[in-house]
Amino acid sequence: MEIKGFDVGNDFLTKEWLQTIQWSAGTEDVMLPDILRLDLIHPLISGNKWLKLEGWIEAFNNSHAKGIVTTGGLWSNFLHACGYACFMHKIPLHVLIKGNANMHNPMLDDLKRWNVEITFIHRHQFYDTSFGQDIAHAKGFFYIPMGGDGEQGEKGVIRWMNALPLKQYDILCCASGTGTTASGIAKSNIAFNNLWVFDPGTGDESIQQKCNELSTLIPEKNIRLFQLKNRFGKLTPALEAFMIHWFNQTNIPLDFVYTAPMCFRLQSMLAAGEMRKECSILIVHTGGLQGNRSHPLLPKG
Ligand SMILES: *Cc1c(COP(=O)(O)O)cnc(C)c1O
């Protein structure tokens, strides 16, 4: 079977995309969750961002616009993935980044290498969605919302999930930012009883709304939102220690913003006996490893 997608991910199914790990939380209980390694999709186009981009780039192609405008933060996984995808397909890309012109980091260096036009914008412009839309409109460009959020992004996720031969699970675990990926997973053909969505401290209230809508749409599934108490994107010493411990146990690198806080929480639930060790679990690894470059000592795979 082949997954269509601009040459990215075509060989995904030949990789070890589904791995079972042995996971203990210091107690005698060992769990054997499966990990869906979306981080293996492509060395530069990270995890779930490619799924969403597939949907968005298809919409761009149908729009006959001259290029793409999108927006994000200084370490944005979405901008990184979008930058490389546009470079590959020779699509002009203009990104609006929250920050100021003196800023430098490896993510920005990559974008420059891929001929991405960068404009630094202020906070208030960043949170004003019409700002980016207006710039796109003025240039005859196509606008993609921050993080690849929206129906097109969700469509890409659903298409990928439907193409993956997965068994039935009691619990699917997925970290959320915009919630697009979790929502696409919920609407796909994957057979599951519970979807656990982990908000790693974004403070975004709309994620609860999205989960409520999903529960209404598919009442036969349990959708549960865990709002973690962390500060979003903060690498605490405890989280760092967990990431190194996890990597030593599993040989799978996690990203410190999304997947590590989720797995850290799952580990504490396991240690507290809040999870039945015999239940079947799929943890979705949504990628994001390029962001670990902001902390030199983290495992990068
Ligand atoms: C962006 C991102 C998410 C969140 O995806 P949404 O579709 O916005 O909810 C989760 N994990 C990683 C690694 C990400 O980069």
Image (spheres, rainbow, N blue to C red):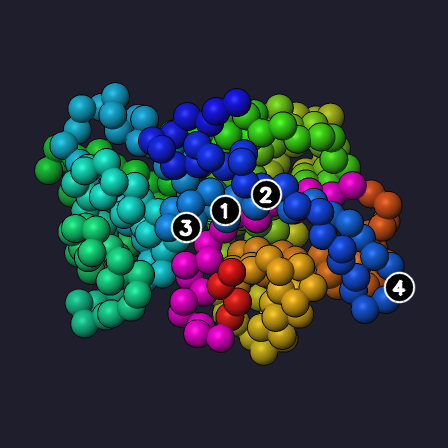
First reached walking from the N terminus: tag 3 or tag 4: 4
Identify the amino acid type marked 3: Pro
Q: Mark 3: give few (<14), some (14-19) or many (20+) Cα within 10 Å.
A: few
Q: Say which mark, if any, is on residue 132.
A: none
Under mark 2, the amino acid is Glu
Task: Point out residue 289 in the picture as x, y percentages from the top left corner.
Answer: 46, 58
Question: Residue 43: which disc?
Answer: 3
Q: Please name which of the two marks, 3 or 4, marks the residue nearer to the observer.
A: 3
- Residue at left offset 60%, top offset 67%: 243
Q: Is mark 4 within 8 Å of ligand 1?
A: no
The reply to whether callout 2 and callout 1 are in contact (CB within 8 Å) is yes
What residue lies at 82% left-to-right and 43% top-to-bottom? 279
Name the residue carrying label 4. 28
x and y percentages locating residue 47 in the rendered image: 47, 45
Q: Which residues are magenta?
A: 280-297
Q: Mark 2 or 1 closer to N-term?
A: 2
Find the distance from the CA under tag 3 to the CA under tag 1.
7 Å
Q: Which residue is mark 1?
A: 40
In the rendered image, residue 140 lying in the magenta stretch gets the answer no
The residue at which mark 2 appears reads as 16
Mark 1 or mark 4, whichever is nearer to me: 1
